[in-house]
């Protein structure tokens, strides 16, 4: 399974880091969190787009090799003092390389989606760019990837990015065709398999038809002239098994074709449903974890409350949707939730132990955790 670079990058943005960035931007913590979740897949999508152009991967590989990733070791400390501005200055050049003269337009689109101003969004993109690229640079170095390896790594991120991009951002950034190719590749694989199956059935049909034509010719030849009716019947009797060949072949061809038309789309749909559901679960756990990590007292609990309420509604809706999906989807989602739930339960316990917090967050946390428990089976 492909490494999810988006998840790796997001793992560096803890609750304290989000608060730091919120203060730097002059935006609310919840809005900053939403903006970060919009910025990261947008940047990664831009990198995928760059890697899909001739020579784009080579230029990107050179940029990654020059990038100092030491700041990722302690991102919170790196944002202190003048560190944040230095990262923004570095990131501004990276963002310009990705989006060219469309930086302002891109900042505006993502900012409106996330609910922050264009100026703040532009600064945030500059801050997030070194983080996203730093994660990729570390992966490139760890796996000793050349330009081709880097391109494969980025191509494998298409589904993750497509699922994480806010509505409307994909087309605004010109990523529609780039990200759609991920689905096209899957469809092509299924279509190829279906084509081969259909061709096999068609070949059998053609062979049977040829045999039938040969049989008809032989029967016709045998019945010309003065051959008696009894002899004609005898001739047909000898050839009747061959007459069944085209019929059987035709039935087989139709059977394979019908199976291909129904099974392939069903498999595609299940895979897509599972990927989307898992992404929703992952995003919910990330947003809830970030919100809870920021809770230190009653005031910060009230700040986190809207995030938790939204997460609860999301999980309730997802639980109903997943229940109607194929068993393979339900099993995959349940396994993911069971893997993530213990850590969240521990965090919830710690947060609720803070004086006064339980009364504020309890009404939101109880249905949220109950929903996750049901989703985990």
Image (cartoon, rainbow, N blue to C red):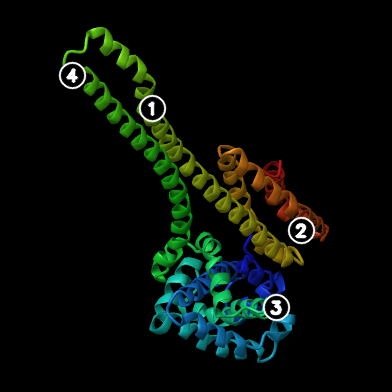
**Which residue is rendered at x = 45% and y = 53% of the image?**
187
Q: Is residue 232 above or below residue 268?
A: above
Estimate the x, y position of residue 353 in percent, counting from the top left. Answer: 83, 58
Query: Residue 245: which disc?
Result: 1
Q: Nearer the viewer, residue 197 or 60?
A: 197
Please say whether residue 301 is visible from this viewpoint.
yes
How many angstroms separate mark 4 from mark 1 (CA)?
24 Å
Q: Earlier in the sequence, mark 3 or mark 1?
A: 3
How many angstroms separate mark 4 from mark 2 (CA)?
100 Å
Nearer to us: label 3 or label 1: 1
Q: Secondary structure at mark 4?
A: loop
Q: Secondary structure at mark 2?
A: helix
How many angstroms separate mark 1 from mark 2 (CA)?
77 Å
Q: Which residue was labeled with disc 2?
A: 357
Estimate the x, y position of residue 246 in percent, counting from the top left. Answer: 35, 29
Q: Earlier in the sequence, mark 3 or mark 2?
A: 3
Q: Secondary structure at mark 3?
A: helix
How many angstroms separate mark 3 from mark 4 (CA)?
81 Å
Q: Secondary structure at mark 1?
A: helix
Q: Nearer the viewer, residue 331 or 307?
A: 331
Q: Which residue was labeled with disc 3?
A: 142
Estimate the x, y position of residue 46 in percent, counting from the top left. Answer: 48, 74
Q: Which residue was labeled with disc 4?
A: 224
Q: Earlier in the sequence, mark 3 or mark 4?
A: 3
How many angstroms separate mark 3 from mark 1 (CA)?
60 Å
Nearer to us: label 3 or label 4: 4
């Amino acid at each position: 399974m492909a490494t999810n670079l988006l998840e790796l990058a997001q793992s560096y943005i803890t609750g304290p880091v989000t608060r730091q960035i919120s203060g730097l931007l002059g935006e609310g913590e919840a809005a900053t969190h939403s903006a970060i979740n919009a910025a990261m897949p947008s940047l990664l999508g831009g990198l995928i787009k760059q890697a899909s152009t001739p020579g784009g991967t080579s230029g990107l590989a050179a940029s990654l090799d020059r990038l100092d990733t030491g700041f990722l070791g302690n991102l919170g400390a790196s944002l202190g003092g003048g560190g944040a501005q230095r990262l923004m200055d570095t990131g501004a050049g990276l963002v310009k390389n990705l989006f060219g003269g469309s930086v302002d337009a891109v900042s505006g689109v993502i900012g409106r989606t996330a609910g922050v101003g264009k100026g703040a969004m532009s600064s945030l993109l500059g801050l997030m760019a070194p983080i996203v690229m730093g994660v990729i640079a570390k992966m490139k170095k760890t796996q000793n990837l050349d330009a081709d390896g880097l391109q494969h790594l980025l191509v494998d991120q298409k589904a993750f990015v497509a699922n994480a991009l806010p509505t409307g951002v994909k087309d605004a950034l010109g990523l529609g065709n780039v990200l759609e190719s991920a689905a096209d590749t899957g469809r092509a694989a299924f279509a190829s398999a279906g084509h081969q199956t259909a061709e096999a059935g068609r070949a059998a049909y053609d062979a049977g038809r040829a045999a039938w034509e040969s049989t008809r010719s032989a029967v016709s030849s045998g019945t010309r002239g003065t051959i008696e009716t009894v002899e004609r019947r005898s001739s047909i009797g000898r050839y009747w098994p061959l007459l069944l060949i085209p019929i059987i072949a035709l039935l087989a061809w139709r059977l394979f074709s019908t199976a291909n038309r129904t099974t392939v789309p069903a498999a595609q749909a299940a895979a897509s449903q599972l990927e989307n559901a898992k992404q929703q679960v992952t995003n919910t756990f990330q947003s809830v974890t970030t919100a809870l990590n920021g809770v230190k007292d009653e005031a910060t609990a009230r700040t986190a409350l809207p995030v938790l309420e939204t997460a609860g509604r999301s999980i309730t809706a997802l639980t109903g949707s997943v229940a109607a999906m194929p068993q393979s989807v339900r099993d995959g989602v349940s396994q993911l939730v069971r893997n993530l739930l213990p850590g969240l339960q521990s965090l919830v316990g710690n947060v609720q132990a803070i004086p006064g917090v339980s009364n504020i967050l309890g009404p939101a946390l109880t249905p949220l955790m109950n929903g996750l428990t049901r989703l985990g089976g």
